[in-house]
Each structure stands twice: as structure tokens, then as C-alpha cells.
Amino acid sequence: MREWWRDAVIYQIYPRSFQDDNGDGVGDLAGITRRLPHVAALGADCIWLSPIFMSPQKDMGYDVSNYTDIDPLFGSLDDFDTLIATAHNLGLKVITDQVLSHTSDQHPWFKQSRTSRDNDKSDWYVWADPLPDGAPPTNWHSHFGGPAWEFDPQRGQYYLHNFLASQPDLNFHCPDVIDAILDTCKFWLDRGLDGFRLDTVNYYFHDQQLRSNPPAQAKPQVMATDLYGMQDNIYNKTRPENLGFLERLRQLTDQYQDIMMVGEVGEMGRRSIEIMGEYTAGSDRLHMAYSFAMLGPDFTADHFRSCIEGFQQGAPDGHPKWSFSNHDVPRHVTRWADHAVDDDSMARLACAMLMAFEGTIGIYQGEELGQTETELVFEELTDPPALRYWPAVKGRDGCRTPMVWTADAPHAGFSTGTPWLPVKPPQAARAADQQTPQGILQFYKDTIAHRRATPALRSGATRFYDLPEPVLGFERHITDMRVSCFFNLSTTAQDIALNDDATLTGPHRATLQDRTLSLPGNGFAYLTHDSPLTPGH
Ligand code: TEU
């Protein structure tokens, strides 16, 4: 039987911003549980919860101080059990975000590790002596700016942090670390969880010889800011040893039924697609992976084609997850505004594209409302890289503002207290209760339902058509069914000559007459063909 996750739609919940039930201004598990029917009604198969574990929240939970307990900010283990049971009753699987590459500096492991060079956990983190002149051991940069090394006076050594200095990297070359980490994963599997989203899955290991990175060959692609993109990050991440750890994880999850792991490959561009392939090839590593390749500014047919084809060619037996938005990047309706007739047209086009892609699909809370990036002023910001580099770096708060439920309620129904990030009028106007039968929410429901009801869209193979920009066109086919899909990535109308008879089926913004498909700006169409095989092929 085909595994549940292969053609699933995964809905990402950012717990701080989904629904606050206790009025402290931060979302919580009870709030999520209450709102799960919204997610089920959308037609999603699974929810991914961004981190809910004990954390000083320096990086909004991506800095864990206890892997096996819920942060009181979000609730308790009982609330977690209730959430899982409610989700399962609604037919939703639940995966959590496991941030294994680094911990918080408040984690007891790190607190102990930093006390001396010869305690039980002294090599649980990546410690290294200063160079003779006192400089850090390598030239590696932190993702959030500055060197990736912090000097600790107590040990007289530097420790590695690929992200904040308060997020020290665990030393995966230490076998005890691997065992401890696997134990924490087992804890949640035993509690009935359906799988994991693995944070920074290509950062686990570092080069033990501590070689410095060479300068970047290509123009920096990361949007950050910092110096991160200025070097080729070959010694601080994506080390060959990673694969062995992924296999250990898979051996663990395979002891349970129907578990799924999706890895976050922290890379953009072609290389990120290769890594996704490597990490999901065969059946003894991850079930699927995503990268930042489709989360950037690029909005050309050629780009989407090269991501999907590149993956297929590099990893015919691998499995991708595609999404356009998440909690780390500006929302796609705003990010791709230059290519949009208007916000709603972009929201519809993007949804229609995503639901036509082969693989697992990810959507990010609020996207189903056609949500746009929230404009914030400096005083409203919380994201560390933005606080440090504003205005060069806008940070990630703009995509993390609260979910909007009821336009006229205080803070659009998110909280009765003061939300940790503000709800602004343009976002509140798109609240769930304002969505009409012709609106974006219904469009998402219809398009997800169409994908679910169309086996070729769910599981068919993909073959691209050679069409000039700005039209992306491909077909999805299974033995006796062929669906062609066309997307106009521009604001100007496009005509496409079809070479056989076809019928418009499912959501579309197009007309078809005498084998000519006319797409208005941002138009799109799914067509079913009478002949199962492409004529001429
Ligand atoms: O993100 C890792 C990561 O690679 C991102 O920093 C990404 O490259 C960047 O945002 C692109 O601009 C994960 C989490 O998703 C993120 O929220 C955390 O801050 C980070 O790990 C550290 O745990």
C-alpha cells in the first residue's frame, strides 16, 4: 500500500501565532486543539508543529533546553496528548519540529559541558582552542551574523554555533550525543507522534579537522545578510557523516508504524536539490526533504522546472516536499508581487501550482487565507537577526504575525491579551470569517480536494513541456489517465496551442476553444485528455 505521506498535504502551524487560549499573547496547544477543525476542513493530512519544547525562546523555540517536555508557554504534556488524540480523531497526523543540531545554552548538557575540559559531557559540544593569536579556530560564519565561534572564558576555549551564540552546536562525532538524541526522539514516538520535521538536517556534523571554508564561488544566495553567503560552507555543514546519522534515525522510526521524517535542508539553489535527493534516496534515510529552493524570489517557469526535474534526475527514488512559504521567509504572495496581477491572483496561481507538483505538499498557516507579509516597524521586531542588522535585514517576524480568525474581534480573534507580534488591518481583513465562497480559503479547499480526487495529480509521474517563459507546463500521468497543467507566471495573457483534445477540469482561470488554451495574467488550468498517451510520444 502507498504510504500515507507520499501525496500528503502538510499544514505547518507556528504555535506562537496560531491561537492563544490563555490570554498571555502567545499561542498555545489548547488553542491549536480548538482550531484543528479548520485544518481538517481544508483537506490537509498532517500538521507540523514548529517547536513547543522547553526553551528560553531566544530563537522562538529553535533553542531547546529540554527535549522531552513542553514549554509551559504552550501548555503541558497532557495538553499535548489531547492535541494528538483530537488530531487523530479528525484524521490528521501530527509531526513535531526536532531541533537536534544545536541546543539552547540553557540546556543542562551545555551548562555541564562548559564547566571544564574533563567532565562527562565535555565533548558533547564542539569546543576548540583559540589560534595562537587568540582568533577563532576557523573562519566559519554564523547564519545570524558574525563568527560561528563564541569564546567561553571558563574553559578558555571557543564553542561552535551555526546560529545564535545561545544555540551551541552539539558534537555529533561524540557517540553519547547520538544515543541521547535518539532517546529523545523515541520519547515522542512512544507518545504516539507520527513523525518529525528535522531542523537544519544538514548541519549535524562538522569537519573534525576544523578546516576553514573557501570563499564563495558563486554570488551569495542567502538572503541573510550577514557574511554567511560569502563562503562555501563545505566544512561546517553537509558533511558525509550526516548520512550515517539519518540511517540511525530511520532504524529507530522503522520500529514504529507509519512514521514520517521530513528534513529541512538549509540551502538554496541547485545544490540544495542534490542534497534533498541524497538524503531521501532509498528507504533507509529520510522519507522526504525540502530546501529553500522554492522559498526564494525566483519565479520563472525554468526555475520550477529545474527544481522538479533536477530532483527527479538526481534521485529517482527519493521524495521531495514542495512549499512556497514557511516561518523563515517572506510570504509568497508578497515575495512574488512583481509577477502578480494582484494579491488574490497570486494566491490562487501559487496554490494551483503547488497542488499540481509531484511529491508531498507543504502549506504554511495563513497561506490558505491568501495572507500577505506584515509590515512592521523596528520597535515591533523580535527576530534576532533583524534586531541586529535592521534595516538591511528585515527578519522573519513579518511572516510570523498571528493567524486571523474573526476580523472584528480584538486582535482578529487570536488573543484576548496583547499579542507578541501585532495583528495589522491588511492581515485582519483576510480573517477566516471574512472568506467568501469565491474567496481564497474556498479555493484552497477546492484545489486540495481536486488533487485528492485525481490520482494522476496525486501520484502520477511528471513530464515537462518545452514552452517558452512565462508559461510553466507539464503533465502528470498514470497508466490510464493524463492531466496537463499550465500556469501563466506573468501578468500578460498567454495562448497555448494544444495538440489533442482536452477538457478543463477542476479549479481553473482559463478558457479553452478549439484546442487553444487562453490564460489571462496569472491564469492556470488543469486539463484531462481523452488519450492516455501524449500524441507524438
Ligand atoms: O532554519 C535553518 C535555516 O537554514 C534558515 O536559517 C534559513 O537558511 C534562513 O532562514 C533562510 O533565510 C531553521 C529554522 O527553520 C529556523 O527558524 C531557525 O532559526 C534555525 O533553523 C535555527 O534553528
Image (cartoon, helix red, strand yellow):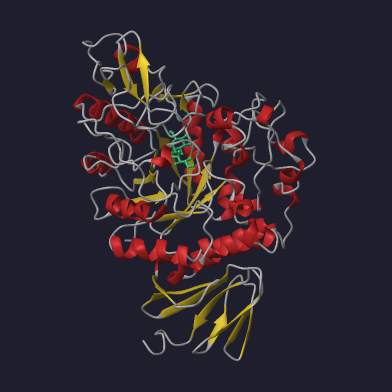
Observer-nearest of 95 and 102? 102
Residue at (42%, 16%) from the top-left corner?
A: 106
Query: Which quarter of the image is occupied by the N terminus?
Result: bottom left
Please determine whether, in this image, residue 349 is positioned above or below residue 26. below
Classify the position of ligand 1 by quadrant: top left, top right, bottom left or bottom right.
top left
524 lies above or below 212: below
Residue 247 in the image: state x and y as whole percent. 22, 43
- For the C terminus, give its image quadrant: bottom left
Going by the picture, which residue comes out furthest to the right? 408
Residue at image location 23% in from the left, 11% down from the top: 117
Q: Nearer the viewer, residue 59 or 378?
A: 378
Within the image, what quadrant is residue 63 found in? top left
Towards the viewer: 106 or 143: 143
User: What residue sits 74% from the left and 39% below the top?
Assistant: 424
* Up-down relation of residue 463 to residue 145 (above or below): below
How many marks the image carries: the answer is 0
- Residue 487 as seen in the image, left or right of residue 457: right
| Residue 436 on image: x %, y % | 74, 57
Horizontal side, residue 346 vs residue 309: left or right:
right
Percent across and percent down for residue 491 are: 66, 68
Q: Quadrant of residue 494?
A: bottom right
> Furthest-front residue in view?
133
Please tell me which residue lies in front, 122 or 429.
Answer: 122
In the depicted structure, whether residue 266 falls above or below residue 341: above
List x then y, in percent, for residue 319. Answer: 34, 57
